[in-house]
Image (tube, rainbow, N blue to C red):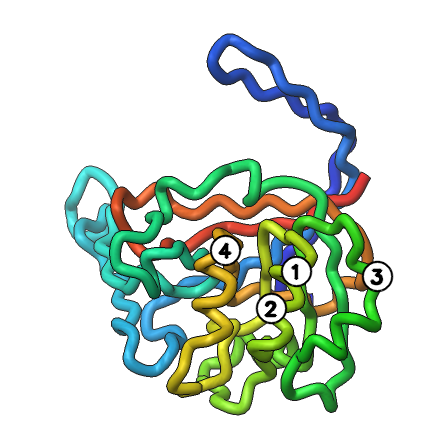
Amino acid sequence: MTGSEQYGGEQCEFAHAGKITQYPTVTRIFDVSVPVMNGGVVYPGNPEIRIEPHSEISKGAGSNLSRLAFGSHTGTHVDAPSHFFDGGGTVDRLPLSALIGPARLIAFPDDVMSVTAEHLRQVELAKVERVLIRTRNSWFVTDRTFHPDFTFLAPDGAEYLVSLGVKLVGVDYFSVEQFHSGHHRTHRTLLEHAIVIVEGLDFTGIDAGDYTFCCLPLRLEGLDGAPARAVLMRS
């Protein structure tokens, strides 16, 4: 598995606004993010990833510090409505309640090139709010070259997920949409219904089933998207 797996058995407590929130004991944590590295893969037309030293201890500086330059849709990232709609909601305004919570990871065989409504109807998704889709893409999402023939969510698949009332859709390549579709119907269908899109997830070696999903995009004010760290957890 390309993503890391961590184990623990302690109950977590988070303090915020004077309240203590307790979460069930987590025994397995799967990192489903892809690494962000200098010169790494980006969707064609997106800004290149540039990471370089700004100061180095080995060269006499008091500390190591790096300079980063990349696009808002780099690596594992979250799409906000403003990605396709002027005046739409921005990534810093996305509800955390959509980005954290129970999720169902569903898997399709390698011969599925487009996840359609018919494919999704064959999976039990009643009352599921976060749908994560594992396809053949997970075999190459961490490759150093871009694969334009990646499996995508078809527009009618997006419409079906809207009809179910899902809050979030996650996919295992750098776009939920067919490469150069020309219509952007999958993106627009999901985003106009305030469904959060998470792209660039790595589900290699992770079984289909129910998990707790946590995906936190950088709080970049007013932007159309942001890189994120995403994990799956099981108790």
Gap in angstroms between the C-alphas marked 1 and 3 = 14 Å
- Per the image, label 1 sits on a secondary structure element best described as helix
Q: Name the amino acid type tagged 1.
A: Ser
Mark 3 residue crowding within 10 angstroms, few (<14) / some (14–19) / many (20+):
few
Residue identified by numbered label 3: 124
Mark 2 residue crowding within 10 angstroms, few (<14) / some (14–19) / many (20+):
some
Front residue of 159 and 181:
159
Gap in angstroms between the C-alphas marked 1 and 4 = 10 Å
Q: Closer to the N terminus: mark 1 or mark 4?
A: 1
- Per the image, label 3 sits on a secondary structure element best described as loop
Residue identified by numbered label 1: 163
Q: Position of residue 118 (x, y in %)?
A: 75, 79
Gap in angstroms between the C-alphas marked 2 and 3 = 16 Å
In the image, which is nearer the foreground, mark 1 or mark 3?
Answer: 1
Residue 193, numbered circle: 4
Q: Going 56% across and 37% down the picture, which residue do you hit? A: 97
Q: Closer to the N terminus: mark 2 or mark 4?
A: 2
Asked if labels 4 and 2 touch by Cβ distance under 8 angstroms, the answer is no
Q: Going 38% across and 64% down the picture, which residue do you hit? A: 74
Gap in angstroms between the C-alphas marked 2 and 4 = 10 Å
Q: Position of residue 92 (x, y in %)?
A: 35, 42
Q: Name the amino acid type tagged 3.
A: Glu
Q: Position of residue 195 (x, y in %)?
A: 52, 54
Front residue of 49 and 105:
105
Asked if labels 1 and 2 touch by Cβ distance under 8 angstroms, the answer is yes
